[in-house]
Amino acid sequence: MLVAFSIAPGTAGPDGSVHDAVAAAVRVVRASGLPHRTDAMFTTLEGEWDEVMAVVKRATDAVLALSPRASLVLKADIRPGWTGELDGKIDRLERALEEDA
């Protein structure tokens, strides 16, 4: 499965930034060893249900260690039997776009 998620602390730094809390969450993701990609808005993880959700929980706990409140947005693509979709979905999209060119 693929899970795209975003965690934000309930309180921001003096400049409105949340980068310290986000960095704490991304450290958890990177340490997990699961395939992942982080962009400006979300981090996407790939793996089995239990392992992916455990990483999301640990990442949320890392944010909560820095803020008394957190907001979690999560979207999942659950497709049993498929792996390599973190790149596979993008590869298929790029091929489709090339066909249109």
Image (spheres, grey):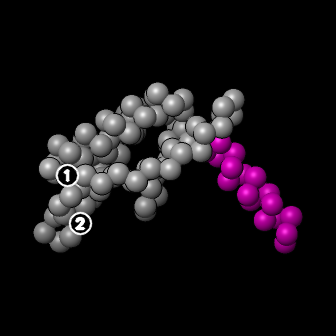
In the image, taking residue 61 as reference, residue 97 lies left or right, namely right
In the image, taking residue 70 as reference, residue 28 lies left or right, namely right
Residue bearing the label numbered 2: 17
Camera-side residue of 26 and 68: 68
* Residue drawn 31% across the image and 35% down it: 58
* Residue drawn 46% across the image and 28% down it: 51
Residue 36 image position (x, y, % from top left): 50, 43
The kind of secondary structure element at disc 1 is: loop
Of callouts 1 and 2, the N-terminal one: 2
Marks 1 and 2: CB-CB under 8 Å?
no
Q: Is residue 11 above or below residue 82?
A: below
Q: Which numbered tag is attached to residue 69? A: 1
> What type is the residue that disc 1 sits on?
Arg
> What type is the residue that disc 2 sits on?
Ser
The kind of secondary structure element at disc 2 is: loop
> Residue 78 is drawn in which quadrant?
top right
Residue 74 image position (x, y, % from top left): 44, 50
**What is the magenta range?**
85-101
